[in-house]
Image: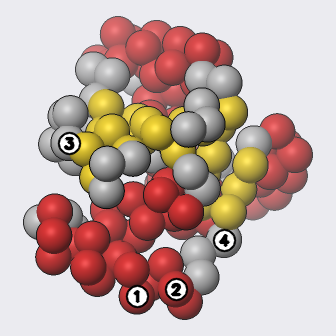
């Protein structure tokens, strides 16, 4: 098994958006990103991060364009495939996940990740004997 770590959008957002109420989570999220060996994200995560940077941090299009350019140059970004959409349906059924979370899990599985860092799913859940859900908070 590779040391690939899939990082969900909520972790990125804690690391990227300064909030007086979430200083501890921001520090934890930043440390997770720094300590991860091989970070993988999906296009879904990139899109979710960008939308929230515009909404919650009031970033403009120029910032988002530069952010995306730098982000995809730094981290492995995988596009979702039609096979992912089909597999996500069985992941959703078998593990009682939301639609969007099942797509994240499916991309993480296809990318041979052993860890999915997220705040949104069940801590310690192991999916397909391969992927462990870890809530760093």
Is residue 121 positioned above or below 47 on the image? above
Residue 95's spot in the image, x, y percent? 16, 63
Q: Measuring 39% from the left and 59% from the top, which residue is drawn there?
A: 105
Q: What is the C-alpha distance between the residues marked 1 and 2? A: 5 Å
Cα–Cα span, label 4 and label 2: 11 Å
For marks 4 and 2, give the one nearer the viewer.
2
Q: Identify the residue at horizontal 35%, vertical 10% (top origin).
A: 24
Disc number placed over residue 125 in the picture, else none? 3
Pointers 3 and 1 in contact (C-beta within 8 Å):
no
Asked whether disc 1 touches disc 2, contact meaning CB atoms under 8 Å apart, the reply is yes
Q: Are marks 4 and 3 in contact (CB under 8 Å)?
A: no
Alpha-carbon neighbours of circle 3 within 10 Å: few (<14), some, or many (≥20)?
some
Q: Where is the C terminus found, in terms of image quarters? A: top left
Q: CA distance from mark 3 to mark 2?
A: 23 Å
Residue receiving disc 1: 86
x 43%, y 66%: residue: 106
Give the image location of residue 21, x and y in percent.
Answer: 29, 18
Along the line of sight, which residue is nearer the eye, 46 or 116? 116
Q: Secondary structure at mark 4?
A: loop
Q: Which residue is mark 2?
A: 83
The residue lying toward the viewer, choosing from 89 and 130, is 130
Q: Could you give the CA–CA distance between mark 4 and mark 3, rounded to whole angstroms? A: 24 Å
Looking at the image, is mark 4 or mark 1 nearer the viewer?
Answer: 1
- Mark nearer the N terminus (4 vs 3): 4
Category of crowding for the residue at label 2, using alpha-carbon neighbours closer than 10 angstroms: few (below 14), some (14–19), many (at least 20): few
Q: Earlier in the sequence, mark 3 or mark 1?
A: 1
Quadrant of residue 136 in the image?
top left
Say which label, 4 or 1, has the lower sequence index: 4
Where is mark 4, residue-wise?
79
Kind of element beneath mark 2: helix
């Amino acid at each position: 098994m590779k040391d690939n770590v899939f990082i969900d959008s909520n972790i990125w957002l804690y690391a990227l958006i300064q909030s007086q109420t979430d200083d501890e989570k921001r520090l934890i999220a930043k440390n997770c990103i720094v300590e991860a060996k091989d970070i993988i994200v999906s296009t879904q995560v990139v899109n979710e991060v960008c939308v929230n940077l515009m909404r919650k941090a009031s970033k403009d299009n120029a910032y988002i364009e530069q952010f995306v350019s730098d982000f995809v140059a730094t981290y492995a970004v995988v596009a979702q495939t039609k096979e992912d959409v089909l597999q996500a349906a069985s992941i959703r059924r078998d593990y009682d996940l939301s639609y969007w979370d099942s797509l994240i899990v499916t991309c993480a599985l296809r990318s041979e990740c052993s860890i999915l860092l997220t705040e949104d799913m069940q801590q310690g859940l192991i999916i397909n004997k391969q992927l462990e859900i870890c809530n760093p908070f």
